[in-house]
Image: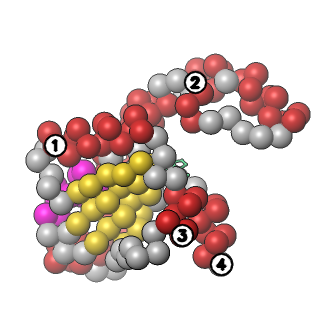
Amino acid sequence: MDTILGQVEDQIVNCFKKGGGVPYSSYKRFHEVMEEESAQTVLSGLFDWIIPLVPRLEEKLKEGINVLDVGCDNGRAINMMANQFPRSKFTGYDISEEAITKAELQAKTHDNKNVKFEVKDISKFLNSSKDLSFDLITAFDAILIKLILQQL
Ligand SMILES: C[S@@+](CC[C@H](N)C(=O)[O-])C[C@H]1O[C@@H](n2cnc3c(N)ncnc32)[C@H](O)[C@@H]1O
């Protein structure tokens, strides 16, 4: 992650002076590196300690619920869950087209028919998805400040 940040250092410093932000697309290999990090944090603990944090969640997932993962990146976590819980339905949203393409490819490889992915900017979620409803929404390592503030 350090070398990735080094490549955009000047742009970041400029943002501190003039405001604005640096888009994900400027961080080369971001999704590849994110996947490596996530394997050691989210994925390694997903079934053993993350899901058990919520009482009866594993049971509900086994019975079949409707799950959304926002900022799903390459879809590793959601594809793992789709595989483990075939009665539940999973949707993954990410703003990155590159990430969603990989997520869809992985779902095909694992023959996961209970998962779908969509390129979507979650900051526009409430305006564009009024008729959608989910039993569980996960956001692993994704801070969605605008969504949270809109709900308050
Ligand atoms: C730090 S990564 C975490 C990825 C994944 N959840 C994980 O745990 O490995 C944050 C992800 O959120 C996505 N993201 C950022 N802003 C977003 C937005 N407004 N709408 C949807 N996805 C967004 C990024 O493309 C990136 O894949």
Residue carrying label 2: 4
Residue 126 percent coordinates (x, y): 54, 69
Q: Is residue 6 above or below residue 59?
A: above
Residue beneath the point at 56% across and 61% down? 124
Circle 2 residues within 10 Å: few <14, some 14–19, many ≥20: some
User: Looking at the picture, how far across and down is residue 52, in whole percent?
Assistant: 32, 69
**Residue 16 to residue 5: above or below:** below
Residue at figure coordinates x 83%, y 40% from the top left:
19
Indicate which disc, 3 or 1, sits on the residue closer to the N terminus: 1
Residue 49 in view in this figure: no
Q: In screen coordinates, is 53 left or right of 109?
A: right
**Kind of residue indicated by mark 4:** Leu
Q: Which residue is mark 3?
A: 126
Mark pair 1, 4: CA separation: 38 Å
What kind of residue is marked 3?
Leu
**Circle 2: residue type:** Ile
